[in-house]
Image (cartoon, rainbow, N blue to C red):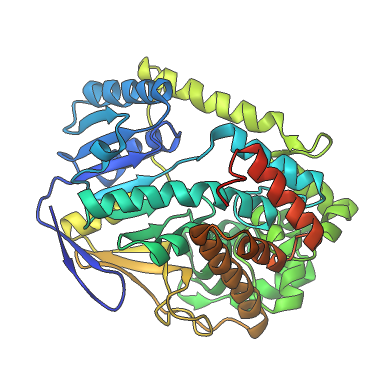
């Protein structure tokens, strides 16, 4: 089991047993197969207990069957179990990976369609903008329930959160629970884009990014140890290799460099939603065409979820069935859940590209305690952020605006205060008007039967 040692960073987690209990909440998610692949990639967590929990019993049984059969076929030591009892799943857990979609497809569809109806047009819609705020209203109470159960049955557990909006979720848990939470994301290093744009060997590139989830910025990039940051900026500004800029895509990123003086490290698909320029970009013949194409979530003609969204879900589910039948192998993810667990359990020091943790002067100009996405070092003593280079004043202004929004949003959800939620929506640069914000919120609460709860 676990012991706590309080530090100025996260509460450090020490594991007495080399065989932790790892629970996946929302195990019907397609992330579960990737996590299984990561056991093989990491290689030093055999003997662990891998507990699958989901409210959807049919999906849970199918995922359990796929995982259990794969483990048996490959003859590895991994104790796999499933349950629809949340308390049982969380009891004595050392690590809890959260990958839920609270409210299911109904809530997802409503958050997109209602926002779209009132002119708040998303690209992805799961992180920021009115649709991201609506998603937070559904996700945060569900994740807080997990945290509060853990306080009773596994007070030393660490939550590794995959559910968007990551910043808002982590903010709320830190505000209202004693349980530690780390928000996880792929992290976007901009190295593939740089390799293609500057004709450089990909493996020799190393970058540092920092900011908030889905809005991180490049603070340094080196090639064989030498900084190429200014060269990269110049190539982007000049529009060198335009096909690379368009295909990445980095059309929005190029405009932001001109305005804010820094290279955003995320592709246009997520970046665009954080800025008040979004609707001008969508109306631009070239940029708008690219943003609509890369959404993969929205049908812009109908203002609803796209057919591609459903095709991908169906294809992912077919893969689960093929794994269960022994027709396909599992693949490792490019996420860091098992890497973090391995480092804490087995005292393996690793540098993690990014994780979402409370700021402790890692980014100057952002208040300590606010959730930032920064590079981290992890070992048996826990997860600690690394200080990054100073961001420009304009970039800090944008980040702080969204962090203030997420903090007000989390408080509004915790206190069931519609006024605070509307304040948060009013801060968001892509909210069309106060009147439309109120209409969006009221219709969403009515649609998912929360009108009397907030």
Residue 83's place in the image compared with 452, above or below, is above
Identify the residue at image location x=48%, y=57%.
169
The answer to whether residue 258 is left or right of residue 154 is: right
Residue 47's place in the image compared with 364, above or below, is above
Question: In this orientation, does residue 285 appear?
Answer: yes
The answer to whether residue 19 is left or right of residue 336 is: left
Identify the residue at image location x=35%, y=46%.
97
Q: Nearer the viewer, residue 145 or 90?
A: 145
Identify the residue at image location x=39%, y=23%.
57
How many numbered marks, from 0 up?
0
Q: Nearer the viewer, residue 205 or 414?
A: 414
Position of residue 216 measured from the top left corner of the image (x, y, whole percent): 56, 66
The answer to whether residue 119 is left or right of residue 91 is: right
Q: Nearer the viewer, residue 300 or 345?
A: 300
Position of residue 241 measured from the top left corner of the image (x, y, whole percent): 75, 59
Position of residue 230 measured from the top left corner of the image (x, y, whole percent): 64, 79
The answer to whether residue 119 is left or right of residue 372 is: right
Q: Quadrant of residue 345?
A: bottom left
The residue lying furthest to the front in this view is 452
Question: In this orientation, does residue 111 appear?
Answer: no
The residue lying furthest to the left in this view is 16
Position of residue 299 measured from the top left corner of the image (x, y, whole percent): 76, 36
């Amino acid at each position: 089991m676990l012991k706590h040692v309080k530090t100025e960073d996260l509460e450090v987690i020490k594991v007495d047993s080399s065989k932790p209990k790892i629970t996946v909440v929302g195990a019907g998610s397609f992330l579960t197969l990737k996590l299984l692949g990561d056991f093989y990639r990491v290689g030093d967590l055999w003997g662990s207990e891998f507990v699958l929990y989901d409210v959807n019993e049919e999906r849970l049984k199918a995922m359990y069957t796929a995982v259990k059969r794969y483990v048996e076929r490959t003859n590895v030591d991994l104790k796999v179990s499933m349950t629809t009892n949340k308390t049982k799943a969380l009891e004595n857990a050392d690590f809890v990976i959260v990958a839920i979609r609270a409210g299911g497809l109904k809530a997802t569809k409503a958050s997109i369609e209602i926002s779209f109806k009132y002119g708040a047009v998303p690209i992805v819609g799961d992180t920021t903008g009115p649709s991201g705020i609506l998603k937070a209203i559904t996700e945060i109470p569900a994740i807080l329930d997990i945290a509060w159960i853990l306080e009773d049955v596994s007070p030393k557990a660490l939550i590794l959160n995959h559910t968007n909006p990551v910043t808002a979720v982590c903010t709320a848990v830190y505000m209202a629970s004693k349980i530690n939470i780390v928000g996880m994301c792929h992290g976007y290093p901009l190295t593939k884009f740089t390799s293609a744009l500057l004709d450089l060997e990909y493996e020799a590139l190393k970058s540092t990014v920092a900011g908030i989830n889905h809005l991180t910025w490049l603070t340094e990039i080196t090639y064989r140890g030498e900084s190429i940051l200014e060269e990269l900026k110049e190539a982007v500004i000049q529009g060198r290799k335009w096909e690379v800029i368009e295909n990445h895509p980095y059309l929005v990123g190029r405009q932001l460099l001109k305005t804010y003086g820094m290279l955003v490290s995320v592709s246009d698909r997520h970046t665009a939603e954080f800025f008040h320029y979004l609707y001008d970009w969508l109306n631009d013949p070239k940029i708008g065409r690219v943003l609509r194409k890369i959404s993969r979530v929205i049908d812009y003609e109908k203002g609803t979820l796209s057919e591609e969204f459903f095709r991908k879900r169906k294809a992912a589910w077919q893969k689960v069935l093929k794994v269960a039948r022994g027709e396909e192998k599992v693949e490792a993810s490019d996420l860091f859940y098992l890497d973090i667990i391995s480092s804490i359990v087995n005292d393996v020091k690793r540098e993690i590209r990014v994780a979402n943790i409370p700021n402790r002067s890692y980014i100057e100009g952002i208040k300590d305690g606010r959730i930032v996405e920064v590079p981290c070092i992890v070992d048996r003593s826990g997860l600690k952020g690394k200080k990054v280079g100073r961001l420009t004043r304009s970039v800090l202004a944008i980040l702080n605006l969204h962090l203030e929004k997420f903090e007000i949003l989390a408080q509004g959800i915790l206190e069931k205060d519609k006024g605070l939620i509307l304040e948060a929506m009013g801060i968001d640069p892509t909210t069309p008007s106060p009147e439309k914000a109120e209409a969006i919120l009221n219709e969403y609460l009515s649609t998912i039967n929360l009108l009397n709860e907030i």
